[in-house]
Image (cartoon, helix red, strand yellow):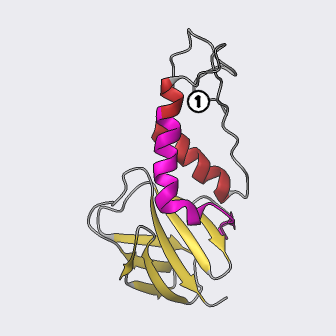
Amino acid sequence: MTMNNTWGYKSYDDNWKPADVLIRNVIDTASKGGNYLLNVGPTSEGVIPAPSVERLAAIGKWMKVNGDAIYGTTAGPFKTQLPWGRATSKTGKLYLHVFNWPADGVLNVPGYSANVEHAYLLADPRTPLTTEADAAGLRIRVPAAAPDPVATVIVLETKS
């Protein structure tokens, strides 16, 4: 994927994708078991344009906190996309990447029936989240506001 509209450097291409779009593209691709290859086109002098550097720094900042939910993961277990975000997984862990934070403080995970031992925000693992299973799936009580406006990651630890 390109960071703007063209492959390689073009001095006239100033239509840069926002960092939040690129971060969500990384997440979306990982949630489907893929690998996101992001094109960076240096100038003829070998300089990476400032807008590229800014976006790469934003992705790096998000990955520093949430990289465990991307690196070494596989696609989430859901057959359809979740209405509020995406999911990735590792043995014994499900990572919920929440793009659209629930206004009522309850995140519904439809059709999820695994036995959750621990639930927490990846950015704050010492603060547990309350979960409740019902016939429709899993309900998770979350903070009133999204800790990360781009994508907050919730970790569900399960028996593997």
Residue where numbered disc 1 is placed = 3
Q: Where does the N terminus fall, quadrant-wise? A: top right
Q: Say which residue appears at 51% left-offset and 48% top-offset.
A: 60
Determine the image quadrant of residue 48: top right
Farthest right residue? 34
Viewed as shown, does residue 28 lie left or right of 141?
A: right
Indicate the secondary structure of the residue bearing disc 1. loop
Q: Is residue 13 at all visible to an observer of this figure?
A: yes
Determine the image quadrant of residue 107: bottom left
Determine the image quadrant of residue 113: bottom right
Q: In terms of depth relative to the viewer, which is nearer, 47 or 50?
A: 47
Q: Residues within 10 Å of mark 1 (few under 14, many from 20)?
A: many
Q: Where does the C terminus fall, quadrant-wise? A: bottom right
Farthest top residue? 12
Q: Position of residue 13 (x, y in %)?
A: 56, 14
Farthest left residue? 144
Q: Say which residue appears at 49% left-offset and 57% top-offset.
A: 64
Q: Say which residue appears at 69% left-offset and 22% top-offset.
A: 7
Q: Is residue 84 at all visible to an observer of this figure?
A: no
| Span shown in magenta | 54-78
